Image (tube, rainbow, N blue to C red):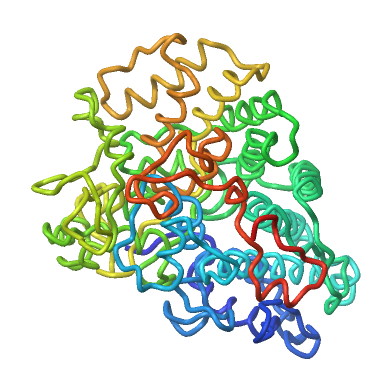
């Protein structure tokens, strides 16, 4: 199955172009553009299609890690598994919380992340910090190459200049998205734009500064982005900008100490009115043809995965191969090798308990397999303990499978409409203006109805903040949201809510508050004296 996506067939080539244009210092993960005239060369821009190819390369950094296949990494000192954007995001937002367990704790960094005992030398944390800054560097490089002066020098046609307006907005959006994740996970970032000198030591923005930049940047570029639902698959539209804005507003109290729930509702309304619709079947969102089945109308922005053109050890390859149980050998049904990765992933007890009531037995969001397994995981290395999950698959909605039995065709749904419905309800419950109770109940009940849950006629008396937190886990588990949700609800640190292996305790123990942020990697601190370590590390 070939995906029809934004220049997917040229992404590897464009990564190569960008690697030529950008080099990584071996000791510090600074991604420093070299002299583009020497390395890109004006011959690259002789064909005006190069500008679309170059912006495709910025997108590619979200899926690929290098130019020599899925095991290659263009960040010195990190392998592909600890530097692929979606995978490290999944680890930091999901593996660190109450939904997932990784069996093979000899994989660098995973033990520390899932037991909440990480430090500034963890390679997964370093991978997220580095990969995000690579996207920022690539976007800055694109913006430098498309300045008015450069386009004038090259006598670029009016038609291509018109297209470049949109490409530049997309580059700024991808840069803003990277800063969003840096703000959420680290509370600071090396900050640079295309206006900074290439080899200039970057200043550091704190959370408040990043918030202001992201907010203004996304507002400024909105008119230059394409309308939702009309762009090529995998390409950002206004809907993605609105989604990031809704996210930062929902979490604004965490980021800035000031609530912005009304603004969150405003942008949720924009997305809801933007033409997106729920997939007919919940599981369509997590299948190999989620770019063409009914999920294509629900997914606002995917991370591309393709068994032919974008092979990577990203989140869907990891979760589908990892969901094959050590007892079940259920890989054939998931579209990968029968044995998969031999029970690499299981679920923590707390996620299983959210589906335990009888009303969730037929809920299509409940893909938990228990068999003869026990619900408890007292020994992480024992792959026969704990339930497994079949949410993601390399099968299609029409009964076929992806083209490769290891590297899946399933795109990772980074943002989708169901999340917007839940954000809308939560922002209303937290005091935001502009929502109606009729819409809150309609949106929540539509998720229940889509999942074939018999309790699909809920009223506002049923929809509390505690309900929303649980429903977000039922709807969005393993989608890289959980840590952020628990931080927002004040439950990630402290002892008010413990889950198995939280804080390295079998039944969970309290975490100190500084664990609400990850540490700045030691290597990054060494490379930029403007960075400071987060308190507590």
Relative image position of residue 166 (x, y in whole percent): 72, 54
Seen at 53% across and 49% down, the residue is 301
Q: Is residue 468 positioned above or below 177 on the image?
A: above
Q: Nearer the viewer, residue 66 or 468?
A: 468
Relative image position of residue 19 (x, y in whole percent): 63, 82
Seen at 23% across and 46% down, the residue is 376
Does residue 52 appear anywhere in the picture? no
Residue sticking out furthest to the bottom: 38
Relative image position of residue 379 (x, y in whole percent): 25, 58
Q: Is 190 on the left-hand or right-hand side of 440?
A: right
**Toward which corner of the image does residue 228 lie, by quadrant?**
top right
Q: Is residue 444 positioned above or below 116 on the image?
A: above
Seen at 23% across and 31% down, the residue is 356
Q: Is residue 73 positioned above or below 500 on the image?
A: below
Residue sticking out furthest to the left: 372
Q: Is residue 148 positioned above or below 30 on the image?
A: above
Q: Is 12 on the left-hand or right-hand side of 331?
A: right
Relative image position of residue 87 (x, y in whole percent): 46, 62
**Toward which corner of the image does residue 459 lie, by quadrant?**
top left
């Amino acid at each position: 199955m070939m995906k029809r996506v934004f220049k997917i067939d040229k992404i590897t080539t464009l990564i190569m172009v960008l690697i030529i244009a950008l080099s990584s210092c071996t000791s510090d993960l600074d991604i420093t553009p070299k002299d583009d005239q020497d390395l890109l060369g004006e011959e690259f821009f002789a064909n005006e299609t190069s500008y679309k190819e170059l912006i495709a390369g910025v997108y590619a950094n979200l899926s690929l890690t290098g130019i020599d296949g899925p095991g290659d990494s263009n960040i010195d000192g990190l392998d592909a598994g600890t530097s692929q954007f979606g995978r490290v995001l999944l680890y930091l937002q999901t593996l660190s919380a109450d939904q997932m367990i990784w069996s093979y704790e000899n994989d660098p960094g995973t033990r520390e992340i899932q037991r909440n005992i990480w430090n500034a030398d963890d390679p997964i944390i370093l991978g997220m910090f580095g990969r995000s800054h690579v996207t920022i560097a690539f976007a800055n490089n694109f913006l430098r190459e498309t300045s008015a002066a450069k386009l004038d020098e090259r006598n670029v046609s009016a038609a291509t200049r018109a297209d470049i307006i949109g490409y530049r907005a997309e580059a700024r959006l991808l840069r803003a998205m990277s800063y969003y994740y840096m703000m959420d996970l680290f509370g600071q970032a090396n900050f640079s734009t295309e206006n900074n000198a290439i080899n200039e030591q970057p200043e550091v923005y704190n959370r408040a500064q990043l918030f202001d930049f992201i907010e203004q940047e996304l507002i400024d570029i909105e008119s230059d982005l394409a309308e939702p639902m009309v762009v090529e698959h995998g390409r950002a539209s206004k809907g993605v900008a609105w989604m990031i804005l809704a996210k930062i507003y929902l979490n604004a109290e965490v980021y800035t100490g000031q609530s912005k729930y009304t603004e969150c509702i405003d942008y949720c309304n924009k997305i809801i009115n933007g033409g997106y619709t729920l997939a007919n079947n919940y599981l369509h969102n997590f299948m190999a043809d989620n770019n063409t089945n009914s999920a294509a109308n629900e997914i606002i922005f995917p991370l591309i995965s393709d068994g032919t053109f974008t092979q990577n050890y990203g989140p869907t390859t990891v979760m589908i191969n990892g969901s094959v149980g050590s007892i079940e050998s259920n890989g054939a049904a998931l579209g990968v090798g029968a044995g998969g990765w031999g029970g690499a992933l299981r679920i923590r007890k707390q996620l299983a308990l959210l589906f335990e009531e009888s009303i969730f037995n037929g809920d299509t969001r409940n893909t938990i397999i228990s068999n003869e397994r026990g619900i408890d995981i007292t020994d992480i290395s024992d792959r026969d303990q704990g339930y497994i999950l079949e949410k993601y698959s390399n099968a299609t909605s029409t009964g076929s499978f992806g083209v490769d039995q290891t590297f899946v065709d399933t795109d990772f749904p980074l943002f989708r409409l169901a999340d917007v419905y839940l954000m809308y309800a939560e922002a209303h419950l937290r005091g935001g203006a502009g929502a109606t109770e009729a819409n809150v109940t309609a949106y929540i009940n539509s998720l229940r109805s889509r999942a074939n849950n018999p309790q699909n006629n809920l009223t506002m008396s049923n929809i509390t903040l505690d309900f929303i937190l649980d429903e977000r886990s039922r709807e969005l588990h393993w989608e890289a949201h959980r840590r952020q949700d628990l931080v927002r609800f004040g439950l990630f640190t402290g002892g008010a809510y413990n889950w198995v292996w939280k804080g390295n305790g079998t039944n969970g123990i309290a975490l100190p508050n500084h664990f609400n942020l990850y540490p700045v990697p030691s290597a990054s601190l060494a490379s930029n004296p403007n960075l400071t370590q987060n308190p507590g590390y």
